[in-house]
Image: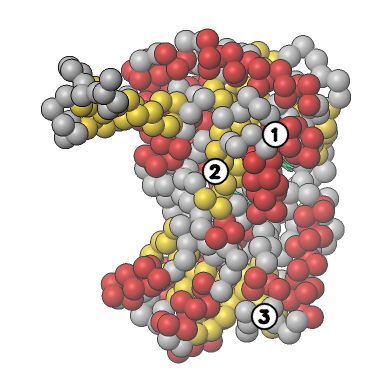
Amino acid sequence: MSTRQYTHFINGRFEREAASYVDRTSPASGELVARFASGQVADMDRAVAAARAAFDHGPWPQMSGMQRTEILNKFADLVEKNFDRLVRIEVEEVGKPIRFAKGDIAGCVGLIRYAASLAMQMSGTTYTNLGSNKTALLMREPVGVVALITPWNFPALILMQKVPFALAAGCAVVVKPSEFTSGSAFELAALATEAGVPDGVFNVVSGKGSVIGQSLTEHADVDFISFTGSTRIGQTVIEASAKHIVKTSLELGGKSANIVFADADLDAAVDGALMGVFFNNGECCVSGSRLFVQSSIADDFVRRVSERAALLKVGNPFDDDTDIGAMIDSKHLSKVMSLVDTGLTEGAKLLTGGNVVENSAGNFVQPTIFDHVTPSMTIFQEEIFGPVLSVTRFDTLDEVIELANNSIYGLSNYVWSKNIDTVMTISRRLKSGWVQANTIIDGAPQLPLTGVKGSGFGYEMGQAGFEEFTQIKTLFLHTGPREPVFAK
Ligand code: NAD
């Protein structure tokens, strides 16, 4: 594939040219793979104006749910048809192993088809119990023009956790993808338009977050901001949204606990520990990056995990058998390595890894595991966003619940046990939007994702995620003669 060059996608077409471009080099090979238009505030203004016009005057919000369902299903068909191209773009721009990129694009198709089905189910409630001449209709309407801001770790998948749900509800969207990985957002917007999504309903503007991301979140014509990214930028999004009192949904960082009890299926839990932290290069918001192991099995379990980790294949993400690809850029690589150094300085015990992969053109880090990590250590608390696992041992249920909840984050947690009492008790007491038992980083389009505490608020996917893109208008209807309140 030759270098791809993208101009902004506004009002149903790619613009003829851009004033300047940002180069994207592959984090695995250093080769130039794409050039994205480097947007300015005026570009964002044009995109928001196109979305505003499409929502206020265009056919999309007025169409029947059935029509929107049909168009979204055609969109899913086109994503399937372009599967290989989209997979390649994700591997080139993110540096993730190809088998995981294939899972991402297959996941996109499932999300679009599920959201398509919801377009036909948009409904409200009627109250007929308010008195004989009073009726109330709670009418569910699209929320309007939606700003969608996405990170670089799952560029297509996270976008599809948002866009088809917004479109199913009848909204128009302006997307600001990560400046590292904008390719799939442009491709998906073009495919949606080819499927019949009207002009102006799905716009994409690429460029720096501090410039166009900021201007999008401060824009007076935006009705809802759905942001996925770091907790730090999430805070700036809240501040920007306060300017015009705009509804926000924030999917932010995480530092999830992966808890293994002695009575678990230990073979499955070993694989779960590896999946928890090495999936997607460890660049995953729901990584199980803090492993808690019950003391009675800890020595043997941790040895097995670390022996298996040392055998994982790090390298060319296009190889089918690669387990861990490249960190997104050299700055992020340095951040990961500096946290590894902090782990050593603060006294955690390094079991395996701990270095970059030498003699490579890419940003590769060895799978790294630290044992005897305590809550006061930086690597216990900070989101590393790389292939670095911290291990902490525990004895009792109460102790591990306290350890797991000792975090500013509350995105997801995982528990491995064959005892249903243990699973239920711990699931109820863990402070996170998501708990998974005897599986890890699993999911389905029907299941909403949300965070608590520093991981954000609002729902993505599922019926709850769909409803985020809608609002209720209440019509209180009085029929027949009405008793005067102020008599003459
Ligand atoms: P980031 O916060 O740096 O950037 C996210 C997006 O925000 C990018 O498109 C960026 O350009 C944009 N942005 C930057 N400054 C902005 C500003 N001032 N105003 C508006 N937008 C701005 O995050 P990242 O490094 O791209 O992604 C990694 C982070 O995302 C991690 O913390 C990870 O946990 C989180 N994440 C969360 C979820 C979830 O579902 N909770 C999913 C994936 C990633």
Q: Residue at x 57, y 63 (%)?
A: 409
Q: Residue at x 54, y 65 (%)?
A: 256
Q: Quadrant of residue 183?
A: top right
Identified by mark 1, the residue type is: Glu
Count of numbered tags: 3
Q: Quadrant of residue 282?
A: bottom right
The circle on residue 376 is 3
Q: Position of residue 231 (x, y in %)?
A: 65, 54
Would the CB of label 3 be found within 8 Å of ligand 1? no
Q: Residues within 10 Å of mark 2 (few under 14, many from 20)?
A: many
The circle on residue 249 is 2
Residue identified by numbered label 1 = 218
Q: Position of residue 478 (x, y in %)?
A: 24, 22
Between tags 1 and 2, which lies in front? 1
| Res. 163 in view | yes
First along the sequence among labels 3 and 1: 1
Seen in the picture, residue 466 relative to 411 is either above or below; the reply is above
Would the CB of label 1 be found within 8 Å of ligand 1? no
Mark 1–mark 2 distance (CA, rounded to whole Å): 15 Å
Q: Quadrant of residue 207?
A: top right
